[in-house]
Amino acid sequence: MSSSLVTTLEPVVAHGLARTFGARRVLDGVDLTVAPGTRLGLIGENGTGKSTLLRLLAGTDVPDAGSVRVPPDLVYLPQEPAVGAGVTVGRLLDDALRPLHDAVGRLEELATRMAEEDVAAEYDAVLAWSVAHDAWDADRRAEVTAATLGVADLDRDRPVDTLSGGQRTRLALAAALVRRPAALLLDEPTNHLDDEALDLLERSLVDLPGVVVAASHDRMFLDRVATELLDLDAGVLGTDGRGGRRFGGSFAEYLVAQADSRRRWEETFAAQQEEIAALRARTHVDLRSVAAGRGPTDNDKFIHAFKGAGVERARARRVHDAERRLEVAEREALPKPPEPLRFDAPVTGGAATVSVRGLRVTGRLTLNRLDVGAGEKLLVTGPNGTGKSTLLDVLAGELRPDAGTVAVGARRVALVRQDPIFDRPDLAAGAVYAAAVGAETAEAVPLRSLGLLHPRDHGTAVGALSVGQRRRLSLAVAVAVRPDLLLLDEPTNHLSLRLAGELEVAVGATTGTVVVTSHDRWLRSRWSGPTLDLTVGEAV
């Protein structure tokens, strides 16, 4: 029997994985066992090694230390799948279906031989494999999957490497879902997918009997698909010391665990600081007691000569012990928990208002009426191309409409774009921040105090920053200038799960007026304020 028809599902196992790029240790001693039927979500801040771990498991990268064992029937889909030169759309899909067709054909052949030959064991094995891979329904499933993922109408003779990045990703995903491999490794699989395609992806993954390991920032995907989560950046109290912390359960349960971890961090930090303060006070008292006081009287000179040296040594030991305990306490103390993201609106002047009538930007946006009251939070939805970003540009005063009136009553407006572009890409991030917020604000609210951009990146030219880093810098500017009208375009894109959650809480808590555009299903499902659907052009 072909190795591709092995019926026993095997786990994905990694032991002691370490990987270093230059001077930076990305993964350090990751131990991992993922049993068949487990769907493991990889989460963590950008740069914590999610994609690196997937490459190591897939065998497309080699660890500096450690070992990997995976099933032979494994499919790995990176964010931008690479396909060999000359491979056509038709060949890619046919290759995915071939093992399934071969299995059905082999069953038919074995059935005809069973009366004369002892092939029962092989027949049972191939039958079990075919059932697990739903081989008889493969062609219908392929048609439905390709249509839902928007690749059914592609020319079968077209080379895959001539497709757009989104088309290649959806085509490779369709092939993987049809094949139903024993282990499927996915890197941000929800990119480029609409709601219907996302629903198909999630249902297909839940139905797989083998191993699924997926790195994702999509909180709804994680909640619907993952049976366990591995947080590669679990935080001060979250790490297990072996390259991340594993959570059993849904993403919603993970959020509860993270909140508990944050609370323990705050409580432990407060207790440690209280102990450090007490040790400092004790050290200060003991030092004073060692300091020279009045000299002995004539009657005391004999006693002082006899006992004084021992007393002074005892006092010195107390000081040394107190200093040692203080040194240990300070060395082992947790760092201060970072302040969560917060948008503080101006104290005076009230919140902004927005009024739009008969707005038209040719070829991009038509909106008859929109009113946003002071302090209101509005969510703008609609497919790509309906004008969500255009609306924010108009409200920010950065785009003049071809028709209509736009009245924005705001003292200060902040727009955070999907992909922020700064006028001086050659300037360092810290200098760009200072120029954007003004010298006085930059001194009062230093960039480092916001915790949005790592200090090592403050000196990097903004043109060399990633999209996610530029988003964080733009958010930092918005936080510092304290706008009364905050405009957020797809704000959770390119952000970590932690920061995305903090941003949503901050939007709900600010007294300012906020207009948000988003495709984020998690954000949309929890939105409690008014919504503007640009496909129908009215608020609900």
Image (cartoon, rainbow, N blue to C red):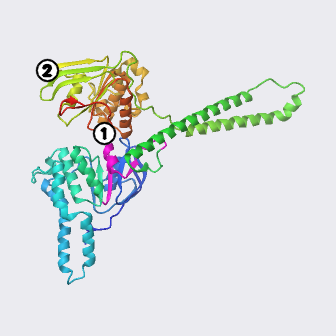
- In this rendered view, identify the residue nearer to me: 134 or 106: 134
Corner quadrant of residue 490: top left
117 lies left or right of 491: left
Q: Which residues are magenta?
A: 209-237
Q: How many marks?
A: 2
Up/down of 411 relative to 339, above or below = above
Q: In what element is the residue under mark 2?
A: strand
Residue type for callout 2: Ala
Q: Residue furthest bottom?
A: 116
Q: Quadrant of the N terminus?
A: bottom left
Q: Residue beneath label 2, please?
A: 403
Residue type for callout 1: Ser
Judged by depth in the image, the label closer to the viewer, 1 or 2, is 1
Res. 302 in view: yes
First-in-chain label (1 vs 2): 2
User: Circle 2: is it few (<14), some (14-19), or many (20+) Cα within 10 Å?
Assistant: few
Corner quadrant of residue 318: top right
Verify whether residue 233 appears in magenta: yes
Q: Residue at x 35, y 49 (%)?
A: 41
Residue 29 location, x and y as percent? Answer: 44, 52
Q: Residue at x 27, y 26 (%)?
A: 422
- In this rendered view, identify the residue nearer to me: 333 or 226: 226
202 lies left or right of 479: left
- In this rendered view, identify the residue nearer to me: 414 or 435: 414
Q: Residue beneath label 1, please?
A: 525
Residue 400 location, x and y as percent? Answer: 18, 20
Residue 20 location, x and y as percent? Answer: 39, 47
Residue 8's disc is none
Verify whether residue 462 appears in magenta: no
Up/down of 187 relative to 328, above or below = below
Residue 153 location, x and y as percent? Answer: 11, 49
